[in-house]
Image (cartoon, coloured by chain):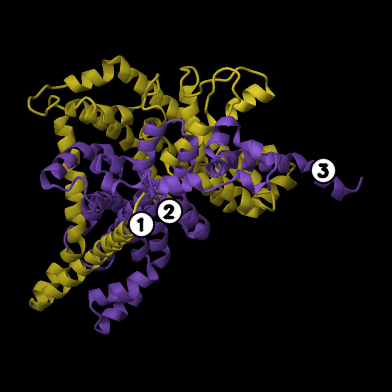
Amino acid sequence: MSAKLKKTLSSIPLHITVIGIAFLWTLPSVGLLISSFRPKNDVFATGWWTVFQHPFDFTQYQLDNYIRVLTTEGMGRAFLNSLSITIPSTVIPIAVAAFAAYAFAWMDFPGRQVLFVIVVGLLVVPLQMTLIPLLRVYNKLGLAGTFLGIWLAHTGYGLPFAVYLLRNFIGGLPRDLFESAYLDGASHLTAFFRLALPLSVPAIASLAIFQFLWVWNDLLVALIYLGGTQEVAPLTLKLSAMVQSLGQDWHLLTAAAFISMALPLVVFLSLQRYFVQGILAGSVKG
Amino acid sequence: MQSLPASLGQILNTLLAILLGVGGIVLLYIILDSLIGFLPDRVQQRIRPWVYVGPLLIILAFYLVYPTLNTIYLSFLDKRSENFVGLKNYIFAFTNPAMHVAFRNNVLWLVLQTTFSVGLGLVIAVLANRVRYETVVKSLVFLPLAISFVGASVIWRFVYAYKPGDVPQIGLLNAVLVNILGLEPIGWLVEKAVNNFALIAVGVWLQTGFCMVVLSAAIKGIPVEIIEAARIDGANEWQIFWRVTVPMISSTIAVVATTVIINALKAFDIVFVMTNGNRGTEVLANRMYKEMFSFRNAGRASAIAVILLLAIIPIMMVNIRRFQEQEAMR
């Protein structure tokens, strides 16, 4: 036997294991996706894998589940609500963190080190510690059940990590750059917008994807501060309510679940590189 | 069915909300910065840093510092936060049988989710490193990370679906049991012997990708010469894994493990959506939610939150310190 053939043969178990793992890992999601396109009666009568008996028989797929879920079940509205919640909840903490990170890195003021340590120290606080007092204040101020209320809550929860990451990045930019800008008469606002911000794009992109997914996929914060207010409920809240009310209506639940995952999956597939960087940097977020 | 104008109105509202939220915050800083521009230079220099960090400090004080202190205080008061009750809520938390179940399950989550996510993540990272289609495999294992816990709960409730009797099984797992192995179907989320493991499996499915990506980056950082040297010295792949790879990435393994441990301590969504803590699947975070909303007992809910905080602090400290060491090495 040639050495090359031997090498190929000995690596077969490796390939089987690796492909097997990838296959097993993907199977549950594939089942969901296929079921969401099958008619109600088919979903109840047979397993989703039976479509592979005639995979190209397109009469066994249809869009009715999606149409029903998006309109009568209110997932269309929930999708818009998720956008209204997630985009500002991503931009606001990053903006607040970027200005503060700039100040911590390039401005001189009393207590700057101590304050930064305190901000990072707040990473240890699980958000469960904040729910009861904040909900009471929210009810008094009328912020419960509003977009503004949930934007600010996500901002508060996301800030310690955002400041931590951006301070390290902005502080690591070359000192000469800033000093020569100040000598040329640039104000702090100019240095922030023209230097710090453009140079921090990689860090900001990672952070943005990370925060976006965190907010889009969040259930607890929405559950507490938006509660039963249907008009502002995001996808996760709506989907978890559907699990309670529709229980076994798999044709609808699978379609609804896929709608809730579509955007994060697009973000994931198109920005995977930044996503991975964000994950690598994000491993300390609690 | 919604009418078209109503949907258009909603879309306009969405755009407006996004514009207000996003534009408002940037404008705030620009306006504040130009307002202090009218002050004398020396005063400006003193005040400007506080314009930049001020909003951060105000938000953190309101959203994290004040509520944390307040929750600690509330944990010593009764259910309506009216009378001081001493340690009564904590005694409840450590003696109540339902709480014992929650503690036991959190320990299960902690041990099993961490072991399997980190272990599988490490194995997949090492194996995938040796095939040409690595990126595809890693993407597929990593994909669940983009999915919400709620979405994953629906996916897995469907995998676990149970039909009694001779009706064809539509859940993948029971179909395998009945059709391939010839066994009886199992109510995965109902049977007390298996339901906790069924829930933890969902957590493992979600978190393994995270572990794999971080560990894979660390493995690629090991200098090739070291591996080659071990190979020349006659080490087999197994020895290289245990004696070279694992020791060299041990600090990364620790960071990943602590992250998964913290997630296990805070486990909530999966339990809330899939079983709501019924039939022996309760965990601390779900119990806290129930005390807060179902039983309206602010004292007990606060005590559970404080217990979570105390469990997380030491782990988080280790995590931040390790992370800083890594950053310093870069």
Residue B327, placed above or below residue B184:
below
Residue under pointer 3: A9
Task: Report the chain holding disc 1.
Answer: A
Chain under label 3?
Answer: A
Q: Colour of chain B?
A: yellow
Amino acid type of disc 3?
Answer: Leu
Residue name at image x 24 percent, y 27 percent:
B294
Choose the circle earlier in sequence order: 2 or 3: 3
Q: For the residue carrying disc 2, how many other residues have a C-alpha within 10 Å: few (<14), some (14-19), or many (20+)?
A: some
Chain A: colour as depicted: purple
Residue B267, position in %: x, y?
38, 34
Residue B54 found in image quarter: bottom left
> In this picture, is B252 found above or below A186?
above
| For residue A10, side relative to residue A130 (left or right) | right
> In this image, A231 relative to B124: left or right?
left
Q: Chain of mark 2?
A: A
Q: Residue at x 23, y 30 (%)?
A: B293
Q: Quadrant of residue B274?
A: top left
* Residue located beneath label 2 in the image: A281
Quick check: do tags 1 and 2 share a chain? yes
